[in-house]
Image (cartoon, grey):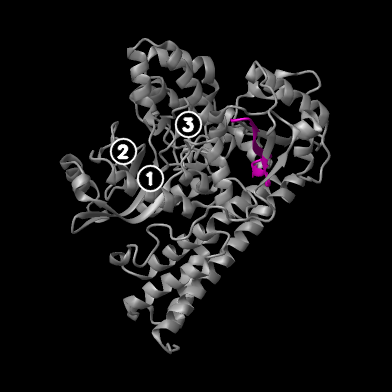
Amino acid sequence: MSQPVDQESFSHRIAQTMVRGFDKHYRLFRECSASAKGRFERAEWIEGQQAVRERIQFYDDRVRETVEFLQSEFDTAGLDEAVWQQAKLLYIGLLTDHKQPELAETFFNSVFCQMMHRTYFHNDFIFVRPAVSTEYIESDPPIYRCYYPNESGFRSSIAQVFRDFSWDREFENLDRDVEYILRSIREHLEVLPGREANLQIQVLNSAFYRNKGAYVIGKAVNGALEYPFTVPVLHSPEGRLYLDTIILDAWRISVLFSLSRAYFMVDMEVPSGYVQFLRSIMPSKPRSELYTMLGLGKQGKTMFFRDLIFHLHHSADQFIVAPGIRGLVMMVFTLPSYPYVFKVIKDVFGCSKEVDHETVRRKYQLVKQVDRVGRMADTLEFSKVALPRNRFSPALIDELYREIPSSIEEDGEDLIIKHVYIERRMEPLNMYLEKAEKAGRDDLVDHAVLEYGNAIRELAIANIFPGDMLWKNFGVTRYGRVVFYDYDEIEHMTDCKFRRIPPAPDFETEMSGEVWYSVSRQDVFPEEFETFLLVSDRIRTAFMRHHSDLFDVAFWHDAQEQIRLGKVQDFFPYPEAQRFRNCYASGAPN
């Protein structure tokens, strides 16, 4: 082991090692993201899904490499505190002209926190608060391009927006699609405003790639008003490009960035610039969620936790046990004034559960790696989370010590949670249905059941079987979508064996209530779903109208066959009725 010449030299080498580790990470991250354009052009959909899965691991790999290098070079456990403090100051200096300073600060935190005790997790040693501004960082190429319809006309400007992405495929009929865009804008605005001198169209330089689509994101500026838009670009059956729709409502654009969907691939030199632009068209979307959806999950976690600490300083309510039926695997609590739930794996599971702690963790990691198709809630995973004990209600404290004693410890005024998953709070579907039935709202029951069945179908097409399909394991989002959020029993569809219940050998056996057929762990009997899903006449009526085929093994076998054939299905994060092919059917692609 090499010996330091002096403490200042030690600090310099640590800071430089950290920067090199981060720069390697972001170079690989950006190369992977930039290659999405080529995969889109070549229609390499399965390769695209694989790239998304592999990219998730990049960050942890580089952190581990950096930690191992520092530990091999230096006696990090015996370093003087002043060395680490000086290393942080020198690190800040190395980020002065950096293009991703906020990400590099988070990388420093990740490395430091793997080597040092949590008593050092404060701003003297890590970046609890950001130290380098992300404002006005120059990017090459620029973050967005500008087009001026007053000079070249609307049609010409809009068409040029798409030509400038230089995709190596021809458009099926760009003039037709531009006309569809203009018609949609006129219908959306009803009255077209006059053209101001500053009229311009601003478009983010990189397309946003996900699944089988490339999303063009921008806004029109006219006078003091701004009009956001997103245009998905898809492949026709003949392999040519076409514009599928234009999304003009900010809330619908926000749905594209829901954490219940797969992460985007975007080529960004300056990610903070992209986040700033996106915030200008989605001001209610937290920056933490935008970073996460851009594939920068660790930065999303950093910003989420800063927001949480800020909120705790500006609120006084207490954490409580989350409303709803208690889970058999997860202990769940929430802060009423903050729209998230905190989930901790219980020490002892319910007797009907056959999984262990490691299996549950693998299931949650699986959810990050698959296409969530808008139907599975993403989670932020944290370790050693320190929260003020006095913000926990007495009832919650009692339940924590009863259900998860091995996962908590007290340190002064803080309660330390060793491992926790955090996700957006939703209304449990069983509670939503109960309220709708009590209110006599058949329309709400019908919509919720329709959404539930659609969620099951879309998950199946994406090669995910929920396992535990009870209503309580699904939630209703603020936009009325039904989303799955209980992952301890999920499986790949292709790992399941869907079976019909064989006939009983005789009447007495059938009436006995005992199972007369062998059942393996991977066996699923869709006929049994009726028992726990059709719990009322209203729900039965809605379910049989929309989704009776989910009780038939044929549906599940067909879904498995499509997956095994390697077919990657389209998932549209906008209504089918909004697609140009359905709005303006004549001449639209099939």
Quarter of the figure with the C terminus = top right
The structure residue drawn at horizontal position 72% and vertical position 45%, both measured from the top left corner, is: 40
Q: Tell me the SS state at disc 3.
A: loop
The mark nearer the N terminus, 2 or 1, is: 2
Q: Quadrant of residue 203?
A: top right
Q: Residue at x 29, y 45 (%)?
A: 312
Label 2 sits on a secondary structure element that is loop
Residue 422 tag number:
1
* Residue type for callout 3: Phe
Q: Disc 3 designates what residue? A: 525
Give coordinates of residue 488: x percent, y percent.
40, 44
Asked whether the residues under the numbered discs 2 and 1 touch, taking CB atoms below 8 Å apart as contact, a structural biologist would say no
Q: Nearer the viewer, residue 456 or 196?
A: 196
- Quick check: 518 above or below 299? above
Residue 401 point in image, percent of width and height: 19, 49
**Residue 186, above or below 101:** above
Residue 559 quadrant: top right
Residue 209 position, x and y percent, is 65, 44
- Was residue 209 drawn as part of the magenta stretch in this picture? yes
C-alpha span from label 1 to label 3? 32 Å
On residue 327, the disc is 2
The CA distance from mark 2 to mark 1 is 15 Å
Neighbour tally class for label 1: few under 14, some 14-19, many 20 plus, Cα within 10 Å: many
Which sits earlier in the primary sequence, circle 3 or circle 2?
2
Q: Which residues are magenta?
A: 203-225
Q: Is residue 303 magenta?
A: no
Q: Position of residue 379 (x, y in %)?
A: 43, 45
SS label for mark 1: strand
Label 1 sits on what residue type? Ile
Can residue 373 be seen from the camera position used here?
Answer: no
Q: Residue at x 62, y 56 (%)?
A: 138
Q: Nearer the viewer, mark 2 or mark 1?
A: 1
